[in-house]
Amino acid sequence: MSHSLSSAEPGRTLVLGGARSGKSTFAEELAAKAVGPVRYLATAIPDPADLDFAARIATHRDRRPADWTVLESADPAAVLSASAPEGTTLIDDIGTWLTARIDARDAWESPRGTVSPDADALVAAVAAYPNRLVIVTPEVGMGVVPATRSGRLFRDEIGTLNQRLAKACDEAYLVVAGLPVRLK
């Protein structure tokens, strides 16, 4: 398989940030600046009854350039393993993907690590991906300890997964108040 990256262009970039930090906008800017077409993997699984979440999804849709290829409700591990088209793939975001995986395994009350096979598959797919990749993920755990078991489970699982993804990526940014800070 040919490798579309120039020597000056990083292969895999992880973009972390809190809610409304500007992480998705920054990641979209990185993807738009890259060479070639953009494939956007939207991981959210919309719930028609959740109007607030539907509005968030609509904001993301409205912001995307019309020439980007969009895969909605995508499983990034499966998509990355199946194909690597020329250009850039943008995944937004790992938090909604992880939530869907915990839901699919009915694991909200299960021990930590129940979604490890899913996380393992994602990290392996990211590490093996041959073309430009930008990954958006929430950075959590910087505040109070969540009051619920499910909140603590998500915080712990995403924290561990973010560490693994950061190791697999060539560069990482933390976005705070719309300002990207290069971590690696």
Image (cartoon, grey):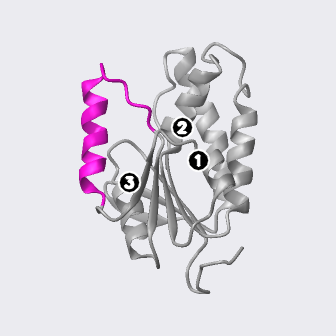
43 over 48 or under it: above or below: below
Q: Residue at x 30, y 23 (%)?
A: 50
**Does residue 57 show up magenta in the picture?**
yes
Label 1, residues with CA under 10 Å away: few <14, some 14-19, many ≥20: many
Q: Mark 1 points at which residue?
A: 76
Marks 1,2: beta carbons within 8 A: yes
Q: Name the residue under label 3.
A: 24
Q: Where is residue 183 in the image (x, y as percent from the top left)?
A: 55, 64
Q: Name the residue under label 2.
A: 97
Q: Based on the displayed image, in which of its 4 quarters is residue 49 positioned?
A: top left
Q: Which residue is drawn at 74% across and 28% down?
A: 113
Q: Which amino acid does label 3 sit on?
A: Ser
Q: Give the range drawn in magenta.
A: 44-64
How many angstroms separate mark 1 from mark 2 (CA)?
A: 8 Å
Label 3, residues with CA under 10 Å away: few <14, some 14-19, many ≥20: many
Q: Which of marks 3 and 2 is in front?
A: 2
Does residue 100 appear in the picture of this structure?
yes
Q: Based on the displayed image, in which of its 4 quarters is residue 33 positioned?
A: bottom left
How many angstroms separate mark 3 from mark 2 (CA)?
A: 15 Å
Q: Could you tell whether 184 is left or right of 112 in the image?
A: left
Q: Which amino acid does label 1 sit on?
A: Pro
Q: Could you tell whether 4 is left or right of 143 in the image?
A: right
Q: Which amino acid does label 2 sit on?
A: Trp
**Can you name the residue that lies furthest to the bottom here?**
7
**Does residue 53 show up magenta in the picture?**
yes
Count how many numbered circles sit on residues in the image: 3
Mark toward the start of the polypeptide (1 vs 2) = 1
